[in-house]
């Protein structure tokens, strides 16, 4: 119930305003956010990234934001992503930049999105960086996949995220494996209607495994992006995590010991680092997935 409440809270602009105006709520949420968000700026994110790279992890970076309707703001977001690509590129090659298409123009128009993506992909190519497209609400799945399919035939450094929770995803993946780009598979962060989606359940876990196999059976590049230890153990025991082209990717601050253990077992591991000031929505998703996060923060506040 709490999970669902936080997913709803994430989407309610009025509640968001009242929560952020309340000093108590704001300071509590900011405190929780600090566990999952590297900082307000790319410099802070890149500092974390460099430490993780030194330890042998690969990294993804995301400048948090989505659902931008204003053209100027979408250009600013794209420019920040370009600056991030260059800043990490000066220090390390081969990073991944993740983004929501609705952050860089999808809600303005498709042409602008494609223009921004081409700029980003060209810049990323200079440093052997890759751009991974995140998957958003189900109402956007078709247009996101369309943009991806247009770009993946032009660029090698692009990948796409697919949500196992959606009933359509099996068909989507069967099509996507015919394109070269990496497929990142996640359970799905958005609350969708039952008619199109599965809630967290054993059935969803079984489907996740089955979708991973559709991808790994043909040796297509894949990022297995989950913190679910049981799922990971099942995949590990089947030898899938050691297969070439397979990586395990987790969000910064979540299950770091599990990822470390995988790394020590020779699995390719990647940490997904987010930064920026728009952390509210991101945080609501992380609490919804694991409500104890909020209790942990309250108790650590009482302790301090
Ligand atoms: P869950 O069933 O949610 O959790 C399983 C177990 O993992 C929990 O019982 C708990 O032990 C642990 N756990 C999970 N979350 C937390 C947490 N916040 N804190 C502490 N422990 C936790 N979603 C999208 O919809 N679109 C995307 O583009 C997208 N990109 C992602 C990229 C990466 C690299 C990752 C890791 C996730 C991404 N997600 C995305 C989010 C994803 O869909 C899930 O919402 C999120 O990963 C939680 O699901 P789970 O697979 O970890 O399993």
Image (cartoon, helix red, strand yellow):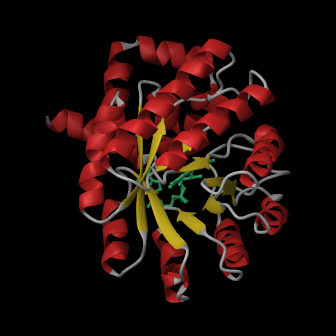
Is the residue 152 above or below the residue 286 in the image?
A: below
Q: Quadrant of residue 260?
A: bottom left
Q: Residue at x 41, y 67 (%)?
A: 269
Q: Residue at x 66, y 26 (%)?
A: 67
Q: Nearer the viewer, residue 201 or 158?
A: 158
Q: Nearer the viewer, residue 76 or 281?
A: 76
Q: Quadrant of residue 300?
A: top left
| Residue 139 at x, y percent in the picture | 80, 38
Q: Residue at x 65, y 31 (%)?
A: 116
| 155 displayed left or right of 40 | right
| Residue 249 at x, y percent in the picture | 47, 61
Residue reaching furthest front? 126
Q: Nearer the viewer, residue 280 or 5?
A: 280
| Residue 147 at x, y percent in the picture | 77, 42
Residue reaching furthest bottom? 238
Q: Residue at x 68, y 41 (%)?
A: 136
Residue reaching furthest left? 304
Is the residue 17 above or below the residue 263 in the image?
A: above
Tell me if residue 1 can be seen: no
């Amino acid at each position: 119930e709490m999970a669902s409440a936080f997913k709803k809270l994430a989407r309610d602009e009025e509640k968001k305003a009242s929560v952020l105006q309340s000093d108590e709520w704001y300071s509590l949420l900011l405190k929780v956010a600090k566990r999952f968000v590297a900082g307000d700026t790319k410099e802070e994110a890149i500092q974390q990234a460099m430490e993780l790279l030194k330890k042998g992890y690969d990294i993804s970076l995301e400048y948090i934001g989505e659902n931008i309707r204003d053209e100027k703001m979408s250009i600013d977001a794209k420019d920040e992503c370009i600056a991030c690509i260059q800043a990490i590129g000066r220090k390390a090659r081969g990073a991944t930049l993740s983004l929501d298409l609705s952050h860089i123009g999808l809600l303005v128009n498709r042409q602008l999105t494609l223009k921004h993506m081409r700029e980003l992909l060209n810049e990323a190519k200079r440093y052997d960086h890759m751009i991974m497209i995140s998957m958003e609400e189900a109402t956007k799945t078709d247009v996101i996949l369309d943009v991806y399919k247009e770009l993946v035939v032009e660029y090698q450094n692009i990948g796409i995220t697919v949500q196992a929770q959606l009933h359509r995803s099996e068909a989507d993946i069967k099509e996507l494996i015919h394109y070269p780009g990496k497929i990142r598979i996640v359970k799905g962060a958005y609350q969708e209607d039952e008619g199109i989606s599965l809630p967290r359940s054993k059935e969803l876990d079984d489907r996740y495994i089955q979708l991973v196999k559709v991808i790994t059976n043909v040796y297509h590049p894949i990022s297995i992006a989950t913190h679910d230890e049981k799922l990971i153990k099942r995949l590990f025991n089947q030898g899938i995590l050691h297969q070439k082209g397979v990586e395990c990717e987790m969000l910064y601050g979540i299950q770091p010991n599990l990822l470390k253990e995988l790394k020590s077992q020779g699995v390719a591991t990647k940490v997904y680092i987010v930064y920026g000031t728009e952390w509210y929505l991101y945080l609501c998703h992380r609490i919804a997935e694991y409500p104890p996060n909020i209790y942990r923060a309250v108790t650590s506040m009482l302790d301090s």
